[in-house]
Amino acid sequence: MNSELHHLEASTPPERRPSSLIVPRHGVVTLCGYGIQVRVDRGHLLVEDGIGEDRRKIRLPRVGHGLKRLVCIGADGFISLAALQWLAAQDASFVMLERDGSVLATTGPVRSSDAKLRRAQALAHVSGAALRITRELIRQKLAGQESVARNKLLDTTTADTIARFCAELPRAEQIASMRLIEAQAALAYWSAWRTLPITFPKNDLARIPAHWLKFGARISPLSGSPRLSVNPPNAMLNYLYAVLESEARLAAAAVGLDPGLGVLHADSGNRDSLALDLLEPVRPQVDSYLLDWITRQPLMRQWFFEQRDGNCRLMGTFAVRLSETATMWRRAVAPVAEWVAQALWNSHQTSSGAVQHLPTRLTHRRRSEGRGNDFKVQTISAPRQPKICEVCGAEGVENRYCRSCAVEASRENMAQVGLIAHMRPKSKKARARISKTISDHAVANTWWDPSSLPSWLTEECYVQRIQPLLKDKKVREIAEAMQVSQPYAAFIRSGRRRPHPRHWCALAKLVDVTS
């Protein structure tokens, strides 16, 4: 009886209990999967997400949790009103995003807005404040694009072109003229990105579409706009812009502005125009972040999936990784939102009244300057991305390759070194030795009798049966079996060279392939 009870207890899975979570340093927790739940239980925020048996349960107290952003990717689940109240009381925000780069909902701490500030925002086009704000926002954006083109892309021609467009902004007297200048600069800027190569691990190349191997055009052929991207880098850029847009919405509401009343972007019923205005100067920082990522390490095929129409989407686990950058963009867009609010406030004041400075709730600039300190925007380093093996795609490697792939990579590198050594000028004695080796192989190929080859050992047999098994053999063993040099044997092993048929018998014997 005891043994049966013991067996029953061992076979019964343990009950899942909510576990506490140490919030990451950046303060962003991203939820994805099915059956997402966000609710409050006895003063604690309870969060559950995941897929199938791979579920995660989070329990956060009101003190010491470190949560700043709760990002939800997906639409299967619920969040209670008590949870929204809990987040608002803790000065944390809730953001709901789509993996295609759309912002579905944002909510966060909102201060009571001043009616004068909202009135000044509504009359910005009449008072002339819209023109001044638009000129400054576009100037900052073009300056950032010039820096990316010059320092990251190393394209001085494109950088000089963007600088010339930026110099034309002071002479523009209409917002439409400034939009035209911005569009012309964007055309030159994204043209420099078009041929940027995108790398993947070597083992994934067989499953990679050809148009995924370069950045391509920023405009998608599916939509005629950046939406519905068709390759991974543009899909990543769209999602990062969505994270930035959510932070711009929250920043506009925090300083007392209406996110829907824009100055640069025209009013539209399906977007928050002011939020899009605020993120324009920060776009080059997002571009620089993505550029550093895709030029330093390869992307992985399992991070993306392609829909039937060719639209490239992000997998949920990878979108979680991109959402961790929200704190970076919050710090970057905060001074822009405060400057726009102050510019609108100044445009509404009368000439007799003294200049009144609005509170800087996002950056605390006035507090720093009141203490006699020089204000500097506090930047946060980007979340560290684990290095990826360039051959198999394994994460967490220290160098370019994992331990299992480093041996093969070193062999190929040595083969390349051997080729470089062969191309260098050689002594008379070395040239004579090489000439004799080439002559001996040519004579052996000439006097070799094709009829000595077994009937079953055909070219198809070599390609399908012998060549795949050579990867399990050492280069030294292949060189000894064929009586050739090790650099040439490395090419044979990798399939880059196909040996003369007179060597097929020796290779078949080496890998134990018979009729």
Image (cartoon, helix red, strand yellow):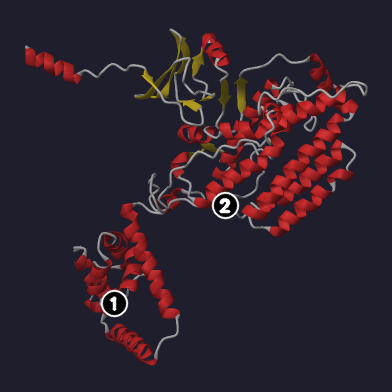
Residue farthest along the right direction in this orientation: 352
Q: Percent from the top left, x then y, of residue 79?
A: 51, 14
Other residues around mark 2 within 10 Å, as few (<14) / some (14–19) / many (≥20): some
Q: Is residue 5 left or right of residue 195?
A: left
Asked if residue 503 shows in the view, the reply is yes
Residue 308 visible: no
Residue 331 location in percent, x, y?
Answer: 62, 32
Type of amino acid at the residue the image marks with label 2: Lys
Q: Is residue 100 above or below residue 208?
A: above
Residue 268 locus on image (x, y percent):
76, 25
Residue that carries the numbered disc 1 in the rendered image: 484
Answer above or below: position of 184 versus 60.
below
Residue found at x 62% / y 27%? 103
Name the N-terminal-most of marks 1 and 2. Answer: 2
Up/down of 158 relative to 311, above or below: below
Nearer-the-camera pick, 84 or 500:
84
> Disc 1, disc 2: CB below 8 Å?
no
Height in image: 210 above or below 426?
Answer: above
Residue 214, numbered label:
2
Which quadrant would the N terminus be assigned to in this image? Answer: top left
- Determine whether the residue tagged by mark 1 lies in a helix, strand or loop: loop
Give the Cα distance between marks 1 and 2: 39 Å
